[in-house]
Amino acid sequence: MTRNWQSHTVEAKSVKAWRLNSGDLLRITDIEGGQTGDLFAVAADDLGDGQSNGRSFDYGGTIRLTTGSTIYSRRSRPLLKIIDDKVGVHDFLYAPCSQEMFEIQYGADGPVPNCFENLSTALAEFGVPASTITIAFNYFMNVDVSTAGKLDIRTPVAVEPGKSMTFAAERDLFVAVTSCPAATCNDGKFQPVVVDIGTE
Amino acid sequence: MTRNWQSHTVEAKSVKAWRLNSGDLLRITDIEGGQTGDLFAVAADDLGDGQSNGRSFDYGGTIRLTTGSTIYSRRSRPLLKIIDDKVGVHDFLYAPCSQEMFEIQYGADGPVPNCFENLSTALAEFGVPASTITIAFNYFMNVDVSTAGKLDIRTPVAVEPGKSMTFAAERDLFVAVTSCPAATCNDGKFQPVVVDIGTE
């Protein structure tokens, strides 16, 4: 089997979305280092059946997803499996940054680019309603959870350029990937990421 | 100000739901000890604006909610504040138990009562669509999170009878409370809980 790979640049503070067929691969590469972003997947046959952090935690028995872990949907169906992870530290606890979050946490007084709006806009092109978009998988985002449960957002582990992670589609789905515009997660820099899609 | 309190029994494996006005109180009491359940709240003015674990984690800076913590909505609005907590250990990571979960984790081969269906049915009476119901607040559920992120469901901390926690409504909302039918969370027993609603 030969794969046909196509390379896409997700510009800083931006988003792209694709339809994947079961078996297709998606690789995210942090080309410059230190960038994070959101990934959100939705089953193609039920646009309300988006990914669920709580289901993925339950079936995986961990809040730390890495190689071998599966992202499950609200209806408990496998969406994406992580088949290779050169970074190893991601977050699946935080909601996507949103206009309201920027106002509350950063004091924004006007519209700012944000992952929730980016995910919603990109997935709307496939008919996915915004109500489906809940907690994104925050790739490369480094969040420490203390034994008491306190959260601390830290500099991404992948500070050197070129680190990647690869997902395999477990069914036909739509998926959006952002490059996150929240300074705290990215150590103050905003960079593009590259998404390579490998189809059979 | 005198409050008018009304007492309601949520039978084992069952659910009840109410409309609360801003300022109303809701107290859950584990009358026999060792029982857990799900709580899910939705803003009355936007039936898509349900509670969000990720937003609550972000604004509270912790995955461990207790006295003083607020449950936020998807749109970053405060829904419920915990004003008294005699137990202190709850979970906000796991998705509500569902028919699919019972099939996958317990090998169920027929329909079983489950919190997702119970929450959906009870909140549907107020017009809340099932798509709004994501991760419930799993009151009294004791989940250990290791430093590596591994999850371990343990016996509830509140094993003696009569322990309670009290929430204050931060806005007009609908809220459903279940008594959970998943054996693992409740140490194998299924008991009713009492919900007292205090209105001004």
Image (cartoon, coloured by chain):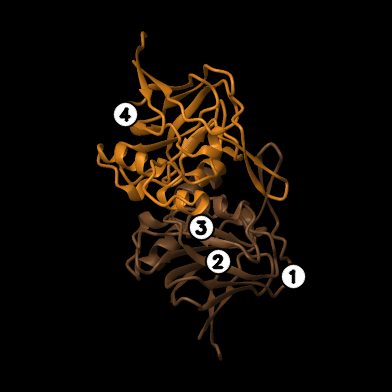
Chain colours: A brown, B orange
- Looking at the image, is mark 2 or mark 3 earlier in the sequence? 3
Mark 1 is surrounded, within 10 Å at the Cα level, by few (under 14), some (14 to 19) or many (20 or more) other residues, namely few
Quarter occupied by residue A37: bottom right
Q: In the depicted view, which residue is nearer to us: B45 or A25?
A: A25
Disc 2: which chain? A
Q: Disc number at residue A160? A: 1
Q: Which residue is mark 4?
A: B18
Q: In the depicted view, which residue is nearer to us: A101 or B123?
A: B123
**Dot 2 lies on which element?**
loop
Q: Is residue B161 left or right of residue B147?
A: left
* Tag 2: amino acid: Ser
- Whether residue A95 can be seen here: no
Q: Position of residue B124 (x, y in %)?
A: 27, 41
Q: Which residue is mark 2?
A: A179
Q: Disc number at residue A136? A: 3
**Dot 3 lies on which element?**
loop
